[in-house]
Amino acid sequence: MKTKFYVLTLLLALFGIRVSAQELTKDEWVKSQVKGVNGKLVSDGTFSDLALKDFANVQTGDKNKNTPGRYAALDVNSKDKSFSFSPFVYKSSNLFLAADFTGTLSNEGTYFDWKNRNTITVGLNATWLLSPSKNYYKRPSDDVYKSMYNKIYEKVDNQIKKDNNKDVANLKLDDIEIDSTVLYNKKDSLAKYAKKYEALLAEKLWTGKTLIWLKFNVNPIANDNFYYTIKNDTVSYKDPYKKTINMFSVQTSINAYRETKRVILYGNFYIKGTRKHNLSEINETSQWNKIRSLTDEAYISESNKNVYELDNSKFYNLFLFDYGLQGIIIYKKFNIGLELKYDNIKFIKPNTTNDVSNIDNFSVGVVLPFKDKTGIPSINIIPFYQYKQYVGYEKASGSIVGVKFSLPFGN
């Protein structure tokens, strides 16, 4: 009796597997698709794809604080030059893991002049995109969706019949940049066409989108490389000493991006902890030259370096926290925007071991966004003016002018 029961169970299981593997009919597939957009403009899968595409195209703000994708950026001002790029990104759902490289060079000589003071940072970061949202005025009726899904099914079905192949369909989507068509099975073809036409329908109805994300940076390698001389040390005058200090840092930031038909708004707040030394932020270098005499009245400069002039070779470290915020507004009609920034930067006062003060940096810039022929953001150019004010330290305030460039490698 038990044997018959097991055999019957096995047959039912096999029959069930067979039934579940059967292809959905046109009416069944259309019904399931309409159910998937019940109360929504697009299905969850399409919405996720569109949100991630929007996220990859975000082109505003400081790159190492917000950008989730691959990018390169350049910042040139009257004091120094900085660069950053991120060549590697791994994506899993709404989580992005990446490696990035940043650096600052002295503004003396050519751009890639590594012989003078420079900082090189190798970091890892994680970006978490919170639940994005999109706004629209009115959702189409279910009849509109039924009509669209019916036409999609007929399109795929006709293609299969046309090619006399019951298993695959020729499919050509806009995002496949090759001349020949691609063969997909019927299930995949239906899914891809559904996403494509849902996106086309939705793009006409979106009125706004909101993206909020968190980013965490860890920079285990952050070498500050510089030369220095010591007063009354004749050896250092002939050949300046070289020093490398690792300025390990961690950073977290929260970012918000809002886009409507008229404007783009972006905001950022960050906190950064850095292992700083007593030359960080505040001290300035002087140019050292190695001179060789040709005659009693003629000399030639054999080499030069930017060096710190110090009283001694003692270096002190403290783990200090900086913070800042940034806001950007871009008017899409005029394709121009405004950037406002504030940074509070801590430093160790010269000739002290643990006396800390800070710098207030205020910056204003004009955002000039450019797009490629398909309308995708390609580069941002931001000329800016920065005012630097010292708090709790006797040094004259100063200003800096410069320009920032940024462009993506690919989304």
Image (cartoon, rainbow, N blue to C red):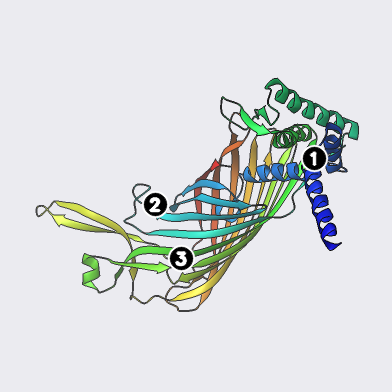
**The residue positioned farthest toward the top in the image shown:** 162
- Farthest residue, direction bottom: 353
Question: Mark 3 or mark 2, which is nearer the start of the sequence?
Answer: 2
Q: Mark 1 points at which residue?
A: 42
SS for dot 1: loop
Q: Residue at x 60, y 58 (%)?
A: 126
Front in this rendered view, residue 411 or 137: 411
Task: Classify residue 250 as left or right of residue 266.
Answer: left
Q: Do the residues under discs 2 and 1 have CB atoms within 8 angstroms?
A: no
The circle drawn on residue 282 is 3
Mark 1: which amino acid? Val
Mark-to-mark CA distance, 2 and 3:
16 Å
Residue 130 in percent (x, y) is at 72, 55
* Position of residue 290 measured from the top left corner of the image (x, y, whole percent): 21, 58
For mark 2, what is the residue?
107
Q: Which of marks 1 and 3 is in front?
A: 1
Relative height, residue 377 to residue 242 (above, below): above
